Amino acid sequence: MASKARQFREHWADELDGAAMYRALAERADGEQREIFLELAKAEERHAAHWAAKLVELGEPAPRADQHRRGARVRLVSWLARRFGTEITVVFDGGTVGPLPTRLPLGPVEVVFTDAGRTADDEIVARTNAAPPDRPVVVVTSDNELRTRVTTVGATVTRSPALLGLATAR
């Protein structure tokens, strides 16, 4: 029974994390996109209520949202969305790793793996250069060469330690 309660509590926490992430994304979105994020947050909250009820059925105390600590991934995505907007792309060198998808959507984060012969740096510069002039682009890197290349085409650069500090904060 304790194992089932732990599993239900983890599901409950995951649903609250999802709701928090969608609410953070809604803060920077407009119009229909904002409404979609808010509806997704409400759906996650309904799912959390379902898992809370399952815990009560097991005789466990009802979990309280004010006692929940968001996971590192949610804190990171929420911070990125609040700071930079709702489109987040992470680019990796993929050509030497083996067979990988070229694009992997993970909620509000798109993960891109480059093809053989193309570096992640080249992909980041190309995406930065292709962004509409009215859309701000922020690149997170501690690579000075990449920093120079993307600032030349209009990006703002944030160094990696700032992001790492947020992801590992307790």
Image: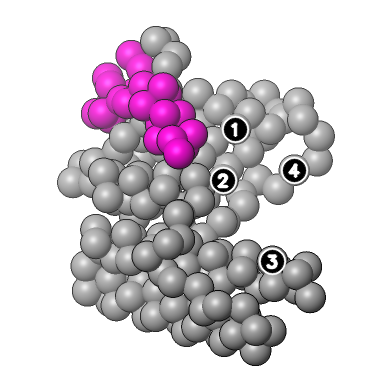
Residue 90 appears in the picture as rendered: yes
As drawn, is 119 to the left or to the right of 5? left
Q: Would you say 49 lies left or right of 140 here?
A: right
Which one is in front, 105 or 158? Answer: 158
Earlier in the chain: of badge 1 and badge 3, it is 3
> Which amino acid does the dot numbered 1 rest on?
Phe
* 162 to 20, vertically: above or below: above
| C-alpha span from label 2 to label 4 | 11 Å
Q: Which residue is mark 4?
A: 100
Determine which residue is flagged by label 3.
6
The amino acid beneath tag 4 is: Leu
Colouring method of the image: one colour
Q: Residue at x 36, y 22 (%)?
A: 159
**In front of the other: 74 or 88:** 74
Give how far across and how far down residue 31 sits, in percent. Answer: 22, 74
Residue beneath label 2, please? Answer: 111
Q: Where the C terminus falls, by quadrant? A: top left
Please rate how many residues cluster around mark 3, counting C-alpha atoms within 10 Å: few if below 14, some from 14 to 19, many from 20. Answer: few
The tag earlier along the polypeptide, 4 or 1, is 1
Q: Is residue 37 above or below residue 72?
A: below
Frontmost residue, 165 versus 152 = 165
Q: How busy is the neighbourhood of tag 4: few (under 14 within 10 Å), some, or many (20 plus)? A: some
Who comes first in sequence, dot 4 or dot 3? 3
Labelled pair 2, 1 in contact (Cβ < 8 Å):
yes
Residue 105: give x, y in percent of width and height: 57, 56
> Which residue shows up at 30% across the image and 38% down it?
137
**Is residue 163 located in the magenta-colored stretch of the structure?**
yes
Q: Is residue 94 left or right of residue 19?
A: right
Mark before the other along the chain sequence, 2 or 4? 4
